[in-house]
Every structure is written in C-alpha cells, then in structure tokens.
Amino acid sequence: MKILTIVGARPQFVKAAAVSRAFQSVEGISEVIVHTGQHFDKNMSDIFFDEMQIPKPDYHLEINSLSHGAMTGRMLEEIEKVFQKEQPDFTLIYGDTNSTLAGALAARKLHGKVVHVEAGLRSFNMEMPEEINRILTDRISNVLFCPTDLAIENLKKEGFDQFDCRVVKCGDVMEDAALFYAQMAEEKSSILQDIHFEKDQYILTTVHRAENTDDQQKLSNLVTAINKINDQIPVVIPIHPRTKKRLATFGLELKATLIDPVGYFDMIQLIRNARLIMTDSGGLQKEAFFFDRFCITLREQTEWKELVDFGYNELTGSDPILIEKTVDRFLNETFKKEHNFYGGGTASKVIAETLLKIHENTNSYSVLPS
Ligand code: UD1
C-alpha cells in the first residue's frame, strides 16, 4: 500500500513525525513524502525533520511567500504532477493549511483517495483561512480521522453520515508525538539554560494567526497586554516570521524576551517548564494540556473546545483587560488533570491499521462508527 503524504507547515511536521513512525512500524506500508515548501526557514522546517527523524521528503516543491490563491494554486499544479507519477493508494494530508487544501484538491480531482488527519475540527469562524481549508478538505476526503468526540459530532451535524466517506475517531496524533519525544526533549534541549529561565518562572507566548497579526488594533492590544504582564512575570516569545514582519510594519514594540522560532524539543521544554501558556496556536493549546499547564487562548474561538469547557483553557481574544485578569486567576490556581480527551498516544497506530484494513477491503467508505 502506497501513501503519498503532503506536508508544508510546522505543525504538520510534528504530526507527520508520529504518523510516519507508525507507518514504518507496520508491514505493507510505503510512504512518499512531499514538502510543499510553505515553511522554509531552517528553524521552521529542517530542524523538525532532523530532531524528530522524519523521513526526508522525496519531493520538495519550494512554494512559499505568496498570496493564498497563488500559493494554493501553484501547490495544486505541482502536487498533481507528483500524484500522476506516484499513483498512490492514498493521499494523506494534515490539519488546515494551504498545503492541506492543495493536496486534497489535487488528489481528489484525479480520483485519488484522500485521507484527512485532524478532520472535523471547526472554529465556526469563516473569516479564518484555516476554517475554509478544513471545511473544504473534509468534504472531499474519503477517510476522515477525527481527534475528538466533538470533531465527530461536527461532521454528523454537517451530514457526513450521508456522504460516501468513512469517519473514524482515532485520537490526536500530536499527543502521540508529545509522549514519544518528551524524554528526548528533556535530554537534548538546553533552551532554559540558554535563555536563563527557570521552571515556573515565566509565561510562554506565541502569536502567529493572521486574525491577530494582520489586524493592527488586535496586535496592538496584544502587545499592550503582553508588555504589562511582562512587568509582573517574564514572558518568553519564540517569534513567528509573520508576527515579526507585522510588528515592524505597525511600529509596535514587544518588551518581552523574544527568541527565534524554536524546534520541537526546545518547544516541549519551554511548555513543560512554563508557569502558563498564552497562545493563538491550536497545537500549543493541546500541548499545554499534555504537560499539565493552563492555557490562555488569544482568540475568540477554539477548535479544542473541550479544554475550555472543562476549565483547562480560557478564551480571551485580544482584550488586554481580560487577558490580564485571566493571567492573575491562572497564576493562583493549581492544574489538576481529570480528563483524557485525546486518546493517550495511540492515534497514529489506529491510522496505520485502519488504512491497511480499508485497503484490503477497498469498496465502501460509508460507515460511521456508532
Ligand atoms: C500557516 C497556516 C496556519 C498554521 C501555521 C503554523 C495557512 C493558511 N496557515 O500560517 O494554519 O497554523 O502555518 O505556523 O496555511 N515565513 C517565513 N519563514 C517560514 C515560514 C513563513 O518567513 O519558514 C513567512 C512567509 O513568507 C509569510 C509569513 O511568514 O510572509 C506567513 O507564512 P504562511 O505560510 O503564509 O502562513 P503562517 O502564518 O505560517
């Protein structure tokens, strides 16, 4: 069974690390990896392949820094060529980026079978490019691997039980990665010593979503909040290139500790030693939970609603007063984990085994699990 995997952006490398490892451990699966090039800096791409020992991409398309349409269009064109050459049994895409949508569209139009890992997530905010990408990708996927019960519910509400596809709850592949690499990160990362911070003495923050960085008022509000909090407890920010550019354009100054984007091992160490996480990243919201840390989500909605419903995470948007109030509250609370929402580290294995079964019995996708 041949799987064509399309990756391109940072969170997809983390997911692919877990799933490719599972593919290698199951007999009868061969994988061809395409890197679209969406993320291209050494510390946004290569470092993940190196530390997490992800197989080297077989194809590198080098498509980046373009508008949404141009980026997606050029990827579509190039992935189509790879698909025609490789003739895979399945084309696998992750998450919600432009690389995801391009991979799904290219394969489906050529009658390929499309596998979406991290299907069914919704923010219900159609202004987000990610929401558009994930809805369109889900609709044209043949096999939809959902990380949570809520994701399954979302698809049912959209009528997916009427469509010719298979929806499977598998758990979250990011939890597989977090569990697998945690010890290695502990041994190999020296980030805390490098930046002179100690356990529980800082807040880790990331901001990169277009909805926050491209809106001057929102970005300015976030800068105000972060600068104020930084006077109380140091804030460390691995700064995404998009955010760096926008801060410069809008003439905004962050007074926190800014560092370059970090690899997976350093990120894991920064998360598990932080007092608290503030982020607009989807992945970090869960990683905070995996490592028993509260999270403040700098967005109005989240796809990981279960974390908010059970008090592990709070949505503040970019409101500086609400952010400061929530920081104060979480700094005075103790994290107690009472749920296991994400499968406990077996998602990748479920994906590999399910695909093999579907491949052996290839006709129908139209079964929803009860
Ligand atoms: C993309 C995804 C988002 C995901 C995020 C993870 C889409 C629509 N968005 O957002 O879902 O959460 O990746 O980080 O696909 N840049 C660099 N170096 C890099 C990568 C990007 O300088 O290695 C620059 C680009 O040139 C561009 C900006 O950063 O100017 C944004 O990159 P882009 O790929 O458009 O989107 P992200 O914000 O990273």
Image (cartoon, grey):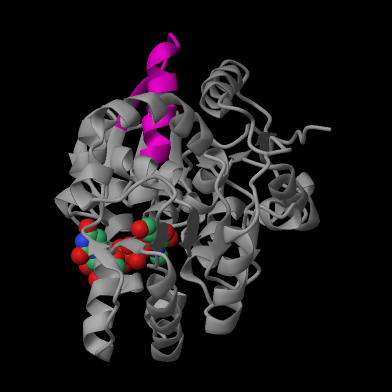
Could you tell whether 51 is left or right of 235 in the image?
left
Identify which residue is drawn at 39% across, 56% down. 102
If the picture is divided into quarters, which one holds ligand 1? bottom left
Residue placed most toward the observer, 356 or 87:
356
Name the spot of residue 183 as percent of width and height, x first: 38, 24
Task: Quadrant for residue 18, please give it.
Answer: top left
Asked whether 328 or 282 is in front, the reply is 328
Furthest residue in direction top, as rendered: 27
Q: Main secondary structure of the magenta part?
A: helix
Q: Is residue 242 above or below residue 370?
A: below
From what the image shows, is residue 30 above or below residue 174? above
Residue 157 visible within the image: yes
Query: Is residue 21 magenta-colored?
Result: yes
Where's residue 283, x and y in %?
A: 48, 50
Q: Residue at x 36, y 47 (%)?
A: 270
Viewer-proximal residue among 357 and 187: 187
Q: Residue 136: image x %, image y %? A: 55, 60
The residue located at (62%, 34%) in the rendering is: 171
Q: Nearer the viewer, residue 326 or 157?
A: 326
149 magenta-colored: no
Q: Which residues are magenta?
A: 14-32
